[in-house]
Amino acid sequence: MRYSHPSRPVVFDPPYLSLRFDPFGGDKPWMTVGTHNYRDGMIVYSVPSGFRTDLDSVPSLLRILFPSNGRFKRAALFHDFAYRQQKGSRFTADAMFRTIMQRDGVAAWRVLLMYYGVRLFGGFAWRSNRK
């Protein structure tokens, strides 16, 4: 099931992801270069320039299947921002994560595993960002 309705296309501005790696960035070493926008007709997110993220929270043992430089980087960026801002529901943030991965051509089996991973274990991050 796709979150985005066919009559509401997913739009990214800019169309490419621009990140800079900061080796001194601690647990969030990636930083956006410029503002990144996501719109799908239902929700809009605007990630500001300089937003810091770890891109994903994949356990070390699973890095072979889910490397940090995979096609899901854009999905991880917007998902992290949605979890930090909490302007919508956790379900909406997770559904957006899945939609962006599908849109960016992530293999279906990876989409399912990563989506259900955030559904099962993302509650910890969601609650810690609420504080």
Image: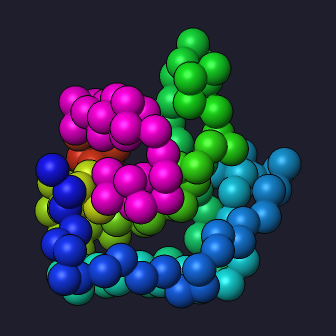
The quadrant in which the C terminus is found is bottom left
State the image quarter where residue 41 is shown.
bottom left
Using the image, determine if residue 89 lies above or below residue 122.
below
User: How is the model colour-coded?
Assistant: rainbow
Span highlighted in magenta in the image: 97-121
State the image quarter where residue 129 is shown.
bottom left
- Would you say 15 lies left or right of 85 here? right
Using the image, determine if residue 103 lies above or below residue 23.
below
Residue 89 lies in the magenta stretch: no
Tell me the residue at 81%/56% (across/down): 22
Q: Can residue 131 be seen in this view?
A: no
The picture places residue 7, in percent across and down from the top left corner, at 19, 82
Residue in the foreground of this view, choosing between 53 and 129: 53
Residue in the foreground of this view, choosing between 102 and 21: 102
Tell me the residue at 71%/71% (across/down): 18
- Would you say 31 lies left or right of 85 here? right
| Residue sticking out furthest to the right | 23
Tell me the residue at 59%/80% (across/down): 15
Using the image, determine if residue 33 lies above or below residue 52.
below
The picture places residue 94, in percent across and down from the top left corner, at 26, 52
Using the image, determine if residue 24 lies above or below residue 50.
above
Q: Can residue 9 be seen in this view?
A: yes
- Would you say 109 lies left or right of 91 here? right
Tell me the residue at 82%/50% (across/down): 24
Q: Main secondary structure of the magenta part?
A: helix
The picture places residue 2, in percent across and down from the top left corner, at 20, 57
- Would you say 25 lies left or right of 110 here? right
Residue 107 lies in the magenta stretch: yes
